Image: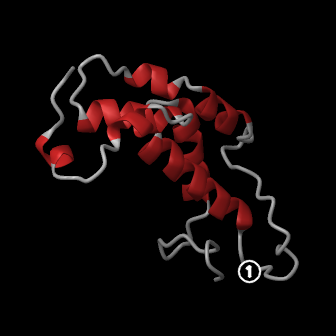
Amino acid sequence: MKTLPKWARELNFDPIKPLLESKVTAISYWVKHDLLDDPTSEPAKLRSSSEVTKIIKRQHRDGYWKSKSRNIEKHPAQNYDLLETFRYTNILINLYGLTRQDPCIGKAVKYLFSCQSEEGDIRGIIGE
C-alpha cells in the first residue's frame, strides 16, 4: 500500500478513500491528479465524463445555457441566461478542466462577450 502524503498523515481521518469513491468523476480525478500525484490520471476521461456531456447537451447553439429561474419577470434587468452561462462555463473550466480548445467553451465565451457593454463591462449578471 502507498504511504499517505505528509499532509494526510496529520489528519484524524484519511479523506483519500471516500474521495476516490465519489460518484462525481471530477472529485476522484482531482484527488488522483493533485493529492496523489498520480501520473495515470487522464484529463481526457474527465472531459468526456457523463457529467460534462450532460452539461454540454443543454448548451444552446448560440453558446448560452437557458436559465430555469422563475424570477425573470420579477427582476427584468437581470440576464438569467448570462448568469447561467457564466455558472456553467466556470464549472466546466474549474471543475472539469476544459479549456478554450473545447468548442463549448469557445461558444460560451463568445456569448459572454456578446453581452459586453460599450463601456467594456458585462452587465446583467446582477442587475444593470
The structure residue drawn at horizontal position 82% and vertical position 75%, both measured from the top left corner, is 71
When the figure is inspected, residue 126 is found, relative to residue 23, above or below; the finding is below
Query: In this view, which residue lies farthest toward the top?
Result: 40
Q: Nearer the viewer, residue 51 or 80?
A: 51
Q: Nearer the viewer, residue 50 or 93?
A: 50
Image position, residue 29 (x, y; %):
40, 31
Q: Hey, which quadrant is residue 60 in on the image?
A: top right
Horizontal side of 80 relative to 3 (left or right) equals: right
Horizontal side of 10 relative to 56 (left or right) equals: left
Image position, residue 36 (x, y; %):
23, 32
The structure residue drawn at horizontal position 49% and vertical position 30%, both measured from the top left corner, is 102
Quadrant the N terminus occupies: top left
Q: Is residue 48 visible?
A: yes
Horizontal side of 96 relative to 71 (left or right) equals: left
- What is the count of numbered marks? 1
Image position, residue 33 (x, y; %):
29, 31
Quadrant the C terminus occupies: bottom right
Helix, strand or loop at mark 1: loop
When the figure is inspected, residue 40 is found, relative to residue 109, above or below; the finding is above
Query: In this view, which residue lies farthest toward the front?
Result: 12
Q: Nearer the viewer, residue 89 or 13?
A: 13
Q: Nearer the viewer, residue 99 or 16?
A: 16
**To which residue does mark 1 refer?**
77
When the figure is inspected, residue 113 is found, relative to residue 106, above or below; the finding is below
When the figure is inspected, residue 127 is found, relative to residue 30, above or below; the finding is below
Horizontal side of 82 relative to 44 (left or right) equals: right
Q: Is residue 97 visible?
A: no
The structure residue drawn at horizontal position 55% and vertical position 31%, both measured from the top left corner, is 103
Image position, residue 49 (x, y; %):
56, 26
Dot 1 surroundings within 10 Å: few (below 14), some, or many (20 or more)?
some
What colouring style does the render use?
secondary structure
Identify residue type, mark 1.
Ala
